[in-house]
Image (spheres, helix red, strand yellow):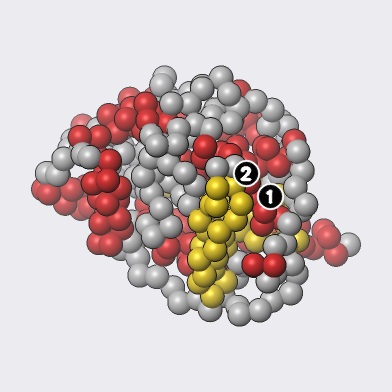
Amino acid sequence: MPDTEADTDHFVRDDTRAFLAMLEAMNGPNMEDMELGEARMSMRAMGSIAEADAQDVAVVRDLTCPGPAGEIPLRFYDTKDTRGPTPVVMFFHGGGFVIGDLEVYDSLCREIAHQLDLPVVSVDYRLAPEAPFPAAPDDCEAAARWVASSPKALDREVTGLVITGDSAGGNLTIVTTNQLANEPADVPVIVQAPIYPIADDISQHQSLKDFAEGFLLDSKTMGWFTRSYAGDADDPRHTPMVGDCSNTPPTVICTAGLDPLRDSGRNYAAHLIQQGTEVSYFEFPGIIHGFTTLRKAIPSGQADLDTFLAAIKVKLDAFQQGGAN
């Protein structure tokens, strides 16, 4: 790991530096050098030591919905046992389309439900390499359309969708939002909120060059994810900025200042602003990719997550006030 402030001239928070030093001292194998199952378990293990304790919520229930290749596992959260007509948050997890699952993101989904006071549906979409592109966007779109239909299994009348997710899930957030903008579901996407997303071709980005090693997500692991996912870079369901983003709803985007994906989020925010979309963009300095699920190890990331979720709430409030007029 580089001596980050001395060697890169980038600001690094004290808790971020301490977490990176801990990882360096552990000297574990790179994820791309592990067996697939071991790599997936390593992400769970990281969460068990680095993620914040889970919020208590009234409802946590595992469900399934129909998908293009069979049933899609879901996890449903709500802070209330019952509620009237409501927007629902769709959450798509990260992990490079290869790792990640409902358990890794359980604490984050509970936090989202708690802070927004909305139901959350977390989607356990199919993973590569067993199910390469376009399995993940196919599953996420199917799950979003199912939730939009107010299925009896949710016992909620759904009035709109808030779509969010991190990293690969940030990509799937944008892709799914675009699909539902072009071919509407039973209710609209009210807000989309990608977290450090992949939105364009990252290969020439300065952030990839600056943070290719030593900042948790490195270029070798990203290459493994890319090869495993086996996507088509010219397909807008893989690279959303090559497609039509003109019907994008109000958007909240956040990136991490020390993230190789930082510039992709920057570019996407600028692209939406240039086309007239209402955008709130946050670039949190001195923190790394994955901070939303590392809040015990990097406590300062909690305030960043709070800021991000508060911005979503502002846009939801504006939508609800507009609907009442």
Pick the residue in front: 171 or 274. 171
Kindly indicate the quadrant of the structure image that contains residue 281.
top right
Residue 221 point in image, percent of width and height: 29, 33
Task: Write the residue at 53% across / 33% down.
Answer: 134
**Helix, strand or loop status at disc 2:** helix
- Residue in view at x 27 percent, y 29 percent: 220
User: Quarter holding the C terminus?
Assistant: bottom right
Q: Position of residue 168 (x, y in %)?
A: 46, 40
Using a 10 Å C-alpha cutoff, classify the residue at mark 1 as few (fewer than 14 neighbours), some (14 to 19) or many (20 or more): some
Q: Which residue is mark 2?
A: 141
Badge 2 vs badge 1, beta-carbon distance below 8 Å: yes
- Going 18% across and 48% down the picture, which residue do you hit? 23
Where is residue 148? Give x, y as percent.
Answer: 71, 55
Observer-nearest of 195 and 77: 77
Would you name the residue on which mark 1 appears?
145
Q: Nearer the viewer, residue 305 or 283?
A: 305
- Residue that protrudes farthest toward the right in the picture: 325
Residue at point 33% right, 61% down?
51
Few, some or many C-alpha atoms within 10 Å of disc 2 (few <14, some 14-19, many ≥20)?
A: many
Q: CA distance from mark 2 to mark 1?
A: 6 Å
Left or right, 194 with reference to 152: left
Report the amino acid beneath label 2. Glu
Q: How many marks?
A: 2
Q: Which mark is residue 184?
A: none
Label 1: state its secondary structure: helix
Q: Quadrant of the N terminus?
A: top left
Q: Position of residue 131 (x, y in %)?
A: 45, 36
Residue 199 in view, yes or no = no
Say whether residue 169 is visible: yes
The amino acid beneath tag 1 is Arg
| Left or right position of 1 against 223 | left
- Give above or below for 320 relative to 212: below
